Amino acid sequence: MQIHVVRAGDSLWQLANLYRVTVDSIVQTNELSNPNRLVIGQSLVIPTQGELYVVRRGDTLFTIARQFGISVQDLVDSNQIQNPDQIRAGVTLYIPPRTHMVQPGDTLFRIAQEYGVTLPNLLKENGLSVDAQIYPGEVIIIPRKSRPFISVNGYIYFFGQEAVPIVEEVGQSLTYLAPFAYLIREDGSLEPIDDNAAILTAYAQNVIPMMSITNFTSTFLGENLASQVLNNPETRNTLINNILDIMNEKGYQGLNVDFENVLPADREAYNTFLQEATDRLHAQGYFVSTAVAPKVGPTQSGLLYEAHDYEAHGRIVDFVILMTYEWGYRKGPPRAISPINEIRRVLDYAVTVIPRNKIYFGFQIYARDWIIPFTEGSEARTISPLAAQNLAIQHNAAIQYDLAAQSPYFRYTDAQGQRHEVWFEDARSAQAKFDMVKQYNLGGISYWALGYDYPQNWVLLEDNFIIRKLLG
């Protein structure tokens, strides 16, 4: 896969020819509603197995071919080069994929060894299963990049039959599915949710259902509720019993605890609950995870942060989801929702106290449309990344890219003359996040929340990683 940022004069026909793909493949990969309309700054995922290379001063076809592990003749043929001894700096060359023609006696394992790649990466590149048969004369593509294994969680707050098509659409890219959420009550009971359809669909997609509990709603902070439950040993025990009953009844295989706005004074009580819950659930073969606010240090003040003890969570539970989003809060002024520069500060702290393989990178998959100038009390509209891109196209608004935040944005004027500013996610920002996950060697990614159209994300996720599937 390649990412192309639209420039003035670009058309899908030109891009298809440049990258040696069809127009339809670009349209389908990016779910473009109007292929004849592009805007400057729009990012497109190009479903090519080759790549482009701009010739630099001092390059020769031999050095370029060696760099990409192909023959000079392949390079000449792919670019219809008339004089191989004369290539100019600045010329763009198409680099074809590295391939192997199957010979008698070849196996996928032997081919992987020959080219120094892992078998899972070879299978992933070619869309093959581990027991696939190969035959002489068949062409196998050799991957140029290594895809690490990763676990992926997706929260979902659509219930009943509404959840089914959402889970079916992205289930192949998930390890876990977390219907959000069972709200705790003062007596340790839990408010029911209609999660049966989501759970059944998760199993059908080889996805592990993970029960999620919380103490808050969109209109209720829940700090006093959490305090009452966490500080009463009998209520904690009742809550754990009720969790186990639901997990046993519904087929959940693990628990996610998302207690937010916990009072600073209840930090140790929260840690005690996590230890008690983990001990009980582990004894019955279940795993436990938590979701924590994005802290940049152990003494960070504020209701969201103080009771979230990164070191304790990393020690007690099986994995920790960092909620690395919501800088661009819907009730605050417009800005990137999950800026990379802010997330880096969180990760720099988190990896010092939580094992890296236990850290899940929180990735929001929605966009925000603010009215500007911003006024206190106003609230941004939340839409999907695909809807945001279509909004830019509708208003012919050039898309800008904040390099520090690694986030796209644009401004437009609506039919009533009102100015807007939209921050969203695109292919570039997704790739920046995936690069960060690999750079920090993290254990997973957690999406908040499924149900927002963002086709580029799922294509790039599969191109960057091998998703763990723990069932079956």
Image (cartoon, grey):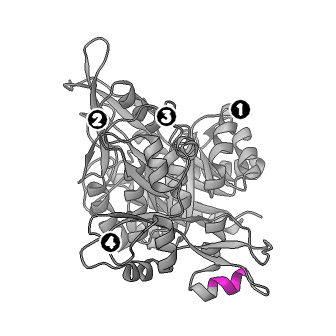
| Helix, strand or loop status at disc 1 | helix
Q: Nearer the viewer, residue 228 or 19?
A: 19
Q: Which one is earlier in the sequence, the residue at label 4 or at label 1? A: 4
Q: Earlier in the sequence, mark 2 or mark 3?
A: 3
Question: Which residue carries the number 3 mark?
Answer: 35
Q: Which of disc 2 and disc 1 is earlier in sequence?
A: 1
User: Which-is-in-front pick, marks 1 and 2?
Assistant: 2
Q: Secondary structure at mark 4?
A: loop
The CA distance from mark 1 to mark 3 is 32 Å
Rendered position, 120 above or below 472: below
Predominant SS of the magenta segment? helix
User: Counting other residues with Cα less than 10 Å from the Cα at mark 1, is it few (<14), some (14-19), or many (20 or more)?
Assistant: some
Q: Gap between marks 3 and 4, in whole Å?
A: 34 Å
Q: Amino acid at mark 4?
A: Ile
Question: Residue 470 shows which numbered tag?
Answer: none
Quick one: label 3, few (<14), some, or many (20+) residues within 10 Å?
Answer: some
| Numbered badge on residue 161 | 1
Q: CA distance from mark 1 to mark 2?
A: 38 Å
Magenta-drawn segment = 108-112
Residue beneath disc 2 = 398
Q: Amino acid at mark 2?
A: Ala
Extreme residue toward the front, this view: 82
Q: Residue at x 45, y 65 (%)?
A: 79
User: Which residue is at the front of the view, 275 or 311?
Assistant: 311
Q: Which residue is mark 4?
A: 87
Label 1 is placed on what type of residue? Gln
**Residue 299 in the image, given as x and y percentages of width and height:** 25, 61
